Amino acid sequence: MSPVATILHEKRNGYSVITLSRPDRLNAFNEAQHKELRAALDECEADMACGAVVLTGAGRGFCAGQDLSDRAPGNSNERPDLGHTLETWYNPLVRQIRRMPKPVICAVNGVAAGAGANIALACDIVIAVKSAKFIQAFSRIALIPDAGGTYWLTRLVGEARAKALALTAHPLPATDAADWGLIWKAVDDDALMTEVAALAEQFAAGPTHAYALTKQAIHQASTNSLDAQLDLERELQREAGMSDDYKEGVAAFLEKRPADYRKAKTK
Ligand code: LHQ
């Protein structure tokens, strides 16, 4: 019997949709799901025809983090090395999403808990259904936020809210998450995939390399000095300005027509 797929990877016109697919466990991660997700992301990274990646979940949840039945200490004296789990699976996943040279949109279709919440926050743009909740569930099981949680929370909502969310495991409604700037927006439940598809199509038709450079600059902004950031912008803009996409963008502007970046890519 072939193993059951734990993700679905659908290639659409110019972008990919990856769906975490263990709905009976709210798409909690086991090793198979990590492996399959990483392979799908590798494919998206290498595929020149893929201009954006959408990450979402099957069923009523987005992702409940680590599958706890896989990492239960049990009754024995042997304790699981969670640091090893992070080093092997979660940290490479977060790094892979971050460095993806095209926009990654997270379509949060339901509850996002534990590492599931923080993998969503690692994505470039997070759009959630209004009924979704973001839960830093870690303290309930005597752990600390991982998968970048302490990094995303502190930077996105500040120390006061970061500490309260992490220490209380308060289920933050998506509408509050949007008001606080933790995510881009919360939309009506039945509008999620239409909104996300429209955005992915916009990115698919857009200047992919400029998006990659923009991500790179923004990622470095919070740790760079102003001088270092200005230098970085100079270098990245130099690179952007040499591209066929820039040539096409300016030509389209001057000719008062929409830019055709797919055409520019084939030149
Ligand atoms: C689950 C899970 C789950 C297994 C729901 N595992 N089955 C990294 C490194 C290494 C190790 C440790 O962790 C980490 C990072 C982490 O992510 S730690 C945090 C792990 N996640 C959690 O603590 C969240 C656990 N889940 C929940 O608190 C609830 O399920 C939430 C609040 C997400 C949703 O609650 P409900 O809507 O009431 O759903 P439910 O609890 O009834 O769950 C539905 C089913 O999914 C249920 O199974 P059942 O057979 O009873 O229908 C749950 O057992 C299962 N499930 N999360 N993480």
Image (cartoon, rainbow, N blue to C red):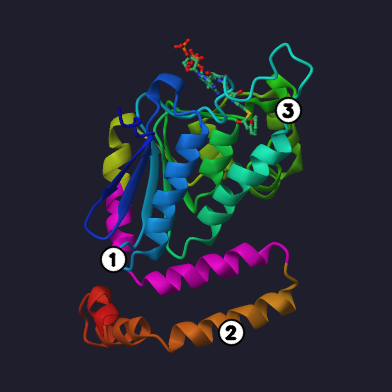
Q: Mark 1, mark 2: which one is toward the viewer?
A: 1
Compared with 134, 95 (above or below) is below
Determine which quarter of the picture holds residue 186.
top left
In this view, which residue lies farthest toward the top?
Answer: 75
Q: Is residue 41 left or right of residue 166?
A: left
Q: Position of residue 140 (x, y in %)?
A: 69, 19
Which amino acid type is shown beneath numbered disc 3?
Leu
How far apart are the alpha carbons under marks 2 and 3? 41 Å
- The residue singled out by tag 3 in the image is 143
Identify the amino acid type marked 1: Ala
225 shown above or below 117: below
- Answer above or below: position of 124 versus 183: below
Say whether disc 1 or disc 2 marks the residue closer to the N-terminus. 1
Name the quarter showing ligand 1. Answer: top right
Where is residue 257? Give x, y as percent.
20, 79
Residue in the picture at 42% in, 63% down: 102
Sequence-wise, the earlier of marks 3 and 1 is 1
Is there any visible trace of residue 12 in the rendered image?
yes
Q: Are marks 2 and 3 in contact (CB under 8 Å)?
A: no
Q: Secondary structure at mark 1?
A: loop
Location of mark 1 (residue): 49
* Residue at the spot 46% in from the left edge and 82% down from the top edge: 240
Residue drawn 59% across the image and 43% down it: 89
Q: Which residue is mark 2?
A: 235
Which portion, as a residue range, is magenta? 197-223
Q: Nearest the camera: 220 or 19?
A: 19
Quadrant in which the N terminus appears: top left
Depth order, front residue of 128/77: 77
